[in-house]
Amino acid sequence: MRTGNLAVGVAAVVVVSGLAFAFVRQGSAEADSRSSPAGMSGAAAAEVDDLATNPDGFKGEVRLRAAVAKVNKAKGVFAAIDAREFESCGCIDCAKHYLPVRYAGELPTVKSVVELTGEVVRTDKGLVFEAKRLEAK
């Protein structure tokens, strides 16, 4: 009987520890995704879904991490999607939000993950990210 009680007690500790660890990890990931959108040193880059759900929270220069969904070299633009979503599903056509990005330099390839530095600009057609710097990840 004591062995059974001991096993149940140990199992309870393991389950509670696992839940506590998962909660702490999830809270840490959420805190990283809500880091300063202005791109201060050490802060995580914002993601496309973060920007799409709160565009007014991203004023001035922003660091943005994204995956490339489509490229139009003639116009110097590409469509960016949330890199977290792309990394979890592996495809570019299941994204919730697509963000047009203007960039004067060489455009990245489809399905590449990039980190951009630039500004969110409102146009008559919606939001556009004006990238000043692009780095492949």
Image (cartoon, rainbow, N blue to C red):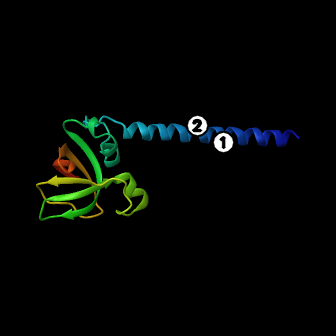
- Seen as rendered, the residue at the extreme right is 1
Image point 12% across, 61% down: which residue?
A: 75
Q: Nearer the viewer, residue 108 or 79?
A: 79
Please give the residue where the numbered disc 1 appears in the rendered image: 15
Residue type at mark 2 is: Ala
Mark 1 crowdedness (10 Å alpha carbons): few <14, some 14-19, many ≥20: few
Observer-nearest of 135 and 65: 65
Q: Nearer the viewer, residue 99 or 28?
A: 99
The residue carrying pointer 2 sits among few (fewer than 14), some (14 to 19) or many (20 or more) residues within 10 Å by Cα, namely few
Could you say where residue 53 lies in the image, as x and y percent from the top left?
Answer: 34, 43
Residue at the extreme front of the image, as rendered:
124
Name the image quarter holding residue 89: bottom left
Q: Is residue 7 left or right of residue 97?
A: right
The image shows residue 112 at horizontal and vertical percentages of 28, 60
Q: Quadrant of residue 113?
A: bottom left
Quadrant where the image shows the C terminus: bottom left
| Badge 2 or badge 1: first in the primary sequence | 1
Q: Position of residue 57 (x, y in %)?
A: 28, 35
The label on residue 1 is none
Q: Residue at horizontal 25%, vertical 34%?
A: 40
The image shows residue 2, relative to residue 126, as above or below, that is: above
Kind of residue at disc 1:
Val
Residue at numbered disc 2: 20
Determine whether the residue tagged by mark 1 lies in a helix, strand or loop: helix
What is the x, y in percent for residue 54? 32, 39
| Quarter containing the N terminus | top right
Tell me which corner region of the image, top left, top right, bottom left or bottom right, holds residue 33.
Answer: top left
Is residue 5 in sight in this rendering? yes
Is any part of residue 119 visible from this angle?
Answer: no
Query: What kind of element bears circle 2?
Result: helix
Reply above or below: 59 against 97: above
Q: Position of 82 compared to 23: left or right?
A: left
